[in-house]
Amino acid sequence: MLVIRSARKSDLDALIEMARLAGSGMTTLKPDPEMLGARLATAEASFAQTIAPEKRDYMFVLEHTVDKSIAGVCAIKGAVGLTEPFYNYRIGTLVHCSRELNVFTRMETLYLSNDLTGSSELCSLFLLPQYRAGFNGKWLSKSRFLFIAQFQHLFTEKIIAEMRGYQDENGDSPFYEGLGRHFFKMDFDHVDGLTAIGKKSFIAELMPRQPLYVDYLPESAREVIGKVHTSTQPARRLLEQEGMHYEGYVDIFDAGPVLQGRVSELRAVRDSVLAVADEGQPQGDTEHMLVSNTSLEHFRMILTRAVPGAGRVHLTAQELSQLQLRAGDEVRTLTLNPRKNVHG
């Protein structure tokens, strides 16, 4: 069986191997022992509440309960851009008009922006290929929303998620090759690696501050602005299902879309329910449900079948053990899939 739990320092070796499999383009998950070790230390401090909320980095792992192996990872950062710059391109429009020549043109532009500074961020979602079956990927992605619903006060009202941008069959980013390479004079993986370890000063030093006209880019670069990596398409759909949406911000290197949402409008915040855990088998019409304990430091979550919206949730002795709970303890529940006409 599988359980989602708060990450700890002892997960380092498993996460390094997972980062190797993730490949390029995932800036927050690189096979760098020092970086990942520091993130896990921050994660432990985050769950223990020994650092300020805006400095926190809540990392979660999907663990196999039999052999304790790690099948997946995901994370939520309390706030981005407060200790180092957080850059995106904002897609805008410039209008050029000449009455004398009767010419009116609208030109799409890219503005180097720090607009999303201070937002909470969903990041580092990765699931080992052998576990990409059933509901594992959907559960892992949506688990973060249930955590936010339980601890809403720890996050900013705006939450974002940077989606991995499109790469061709050779693993190259058409957007980077058409724009970024002209300024940075280095390979995409090198630039991506520098930002992963917090070295971002070169962005301000090398990138132009004035708007860039999209029409000046090669067609191959224009076509992929706001387009996600093929393997990221399911992840994008899941986030949009939970209340995230695209508002015209993209990554400065691969032009992957940045999804945004208001925490108060997330499905999990609106629809999740606090309930009491009972030992036993559920009675009635059940659905797949995310069920978590309500402990910050020892957060744990399972996927099970239960009656949606019920004030009491029946769990087996094994499930209670996975959540480190006893009958009578409080849990938070959410349907895995949005319920049709849930509000009326």
Image (spheres, rainbow, N blue to C red):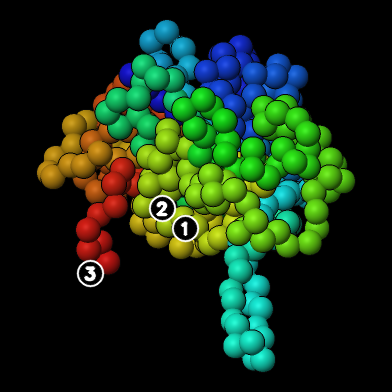
- The spot of residue 24 in percent (x, y) is 59, 27
- Mark 3 crowdedness (10 Å alpha carbons): few <14, some 14-19, many ≥20: few
Does the CB distance between marks 3 and 1 fall below 8 Å?
no
Disc 1 target residue: 245
Tell me how far mark 2 sits from mark 3, CA to CA: 21 Å
* Mark 2 Cα shell of 10 Å, populated few (<14), some (14-19), many (≥20): some
Q: Which residue is the site of mark 3? A: 344
Residue 328 locus on image (x, y percent): 36, 38
Q: Which residue is mark 2?
A: 240
Instruction: Tell whether label 2 touches label 1 (CB within 8 Å).
Output: yes
Q: Residue at x 40, y 41 (%)?
A: 233
Disc 1 is placed on an element classified as strand
The CA distance from mark 3 to mark 1 is 23 Å
Considering only order in the chain, which callout, 3 or 2, is on the residue closer to the N terminus?
2
Q: Given the image, on which type of amino acid does mark 2 rest?
A: Glu
Q: Nearer the viewer, residue 315 or 117?
A: 117
